[in-house]
Structures are given as C-alpha cells and as structure tokens.
Amino acid sequence: MKSFLLIPLLLFALGVQAQEDEFNLKNAGDYNNFIMKEMTTAVQKNFDYLAFVVHSDAFDQMDEKRKEVVKQIVEAKDKVSQMPPLDGDTRLRDESVEVLNEYKSAFELDFKQIISLKKKSRDSFEAMKEYFKAEDDAEEKLNKATQKLRRAQRQYASKNNMTVVDGKADDELERKMGKAKATNLYWRSVFIEYFKVSEAYDLMWDALNQRKASVIDNERQKVIKVINSTLPDIKAIPAFNGDTEFRDQTISIVEYYQQVADIQFAKITERLKKSELEQADIDVVNSIINQCNADHERLAYNWNQASQELFRKNVEKE
C-alpha cells in the first residue's frame, strides 16, 4: 500500500474477514480483525475531520470535530486494551494500544495547537509557514505511529502463518485520504506563493494612511520586486488532475497586483509628491482607490470560488 503522511492508519486485514460483530478472539484472524475494525472506525472519524478542516475557517466546528476524533480513539483504545492475550501473546494488542495513545496525544495536543496556529496564519508569511510546518509535523507523527503498527502486524502474521492482504474498505479509505492529502499539498504550493505577494500588497495599501509619497513608493517597489520573483514560480506549477483553474485565478490576481503597483500606485505617488494637493489630485487618487477596490472584490471572489471548487472536486466528504 502506498504511504501518505496524512493517513494516520494504513490498515491491513489478515485472512478472511469475520462478520462485523462476530469475533472469536481465540482465532488469530478474528483477533487481528477485531483490532482492525476498531482502528478503521477511528480512522474514518479522522478522515471526516480532515475532510472538513482541509479548507475551512470554522474554528469552533473544527475543534468540536477534533474532540470527536479523540473520543473515538479513546473508545477504540478501551475496547482493544480489554482484549485477552492470544495464546499468551499480547504484542499486537499492546502495540495497537500504544499507537492509539500516540494518536490520542496528537489530536489532544498537536492538532489543537494547529487550529490555534491556523487562526493566526494569515497574520504574516512567517505565521503561515509555521502553521504549515506544524501540520506537516503532526502528520509525520501519525505516520511514524502507523509504521509501528504495520511492523507489529507483519510480525503477527509471520508468527501465525498468515498472509497480509489489503482490505477493500481500507483501500477505499486510503484512496480518499490520499486524494485529500494531494489536494491540500497542491493548494498549499499555490497559496504560499500567493500569500507572499499578498502580504507585500497589503503593506503597500497600509502605507497610504501615511500619505507620504516616499513611503508609499518604497512599498510599491517591494510589491513589484516580490511579484517579479514569484510570478514565474506560480506559472510553472502544473495542472492538478488536468485542472488549472485555481492556479490560473491566482496568476490573474497576482498580475492584477502587479498592474496596481506598477501603474496605479505610481500615479498616486506622483500626485502625493506635490507640495499642495488640489481637488483634482484628490479626485484622481480617490478614483484609483475606488476602482482598485471594485476590481479586487471581483478577482478575490473568482479566486475564492476556484479555491473552493478545487477542494469540492477532489476531497470526498464520506
């Protein structure tokens, strides 16, 4: 099975699956399948969480769903930990409980912190990178725990003369989580470049409050510089599953920022260089600002729609 960092569990089924609620815990196949059933339930809850938070800013709901994952993990851990030994062997049971404890820790601490970081992520480019790094670190933590479980399963299978095979339901869950991961990574690769430009662009607009041509022009030049270095990188990003809409909308809004900084704000700074502004100068500046606001609202709407559509088409909800 392929390994995706987003996946907290890559599940295996050993031998023939038992009926859902009929497990003979003295049978090696059923013993494994009982554990994997509990793991699968926890993973499904985790997927529901990931599918929701991957592109949502509803922080209260995110935290509630995080708590639901913790609750499901605790329930699974309690059931598995109460299993009897199989012929005196508790290794698979104990390794599974240890893995579930690591998942519980991740969702109680790491993912709670990630929600806090996400709230502040748009404050700065550095805050955004910190949020992305925390997300990657938490996923890697889950992945390492997964590998521990996989090793325990292989040893269990070898000891009990069984063959490790992939369960169809687990393959489907892995496929969904793999798509969610790939989509999020693609979105991030485009967004982080856009955000770098957006931060500089916002500072240019903030500089208007000072009404000093030199200050505004300095920020304007910074925007042009960051766009010149960033725009080629965005254009080089390939399509995602044949779809370029989100990337292209990002290019459009960045090129618009370039035009505003290069032309519109150049006009504003030229007006503000005058020792005294006439009403005509004020009217020109206000007209530029109003037009930029209207244009940006339209482009931002298109960009947000493309962003949402990317996730709608590629992240399955169930």
Image (spheres, grey):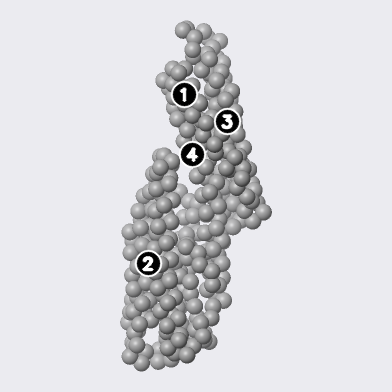
Q: Amino acid at mark 4?
A: Lys
Read off the residue under disc 3: 258
Read off the residue under disc 2: 103
Relative to 84, say whether 37 is above or below.
above
Q: Which mark is residue 196?
A: 4
Q: Amino acid at mark 3?
A: Gln
Near mark 4 (Cα within 10 A), the count class, few <14, some 14-19 or many ≥20, is: some
Query: Closer to the camera: disc 4 or disc 2?
Result: 4
Q: Earlier in the sequence, mark 1 or mark 3?
A: 1
- Which residue is pictured at 57% across the width and 25% down the height? 262
Q: Amino acid at mark 2?
A: Tyr
Residue 104 occupies quadrant: bottom left
The N terminus is located in which quarter? bottom right
Secondary structure beneath dot 4 equals: helix
Q: Which mark is residue 58?
A: none
**Whether residue 153 can be seen here:** yes
Percent coordinates x, y for residue 170 in the rendering: 52, 73
Tell whether label 2 touches label 4 (CB within 8 Å). Answer: no
- Which residue is pictured at 47% across the width and 33% down the height? 200
Read off the residue under disc 1: 218
Mark 2 to mark 1: distance in Å?
49 Å
Query: Closer to the camera: disc 3 or disc 2?
Result: 3
Q: Earlier in the sequence, mark 3 or mark 4?
A: 4
Which of these two is toward me, 17 or 182? 182
Q: Amino acid at mark 1?
A: Asn
Mark 4 to mark 2: distance in Å?
33 Å
Secondary structure beneath dot 2 equals: helix
Query: Closer to the camera: disc 2 or disc 1?
Result: 1
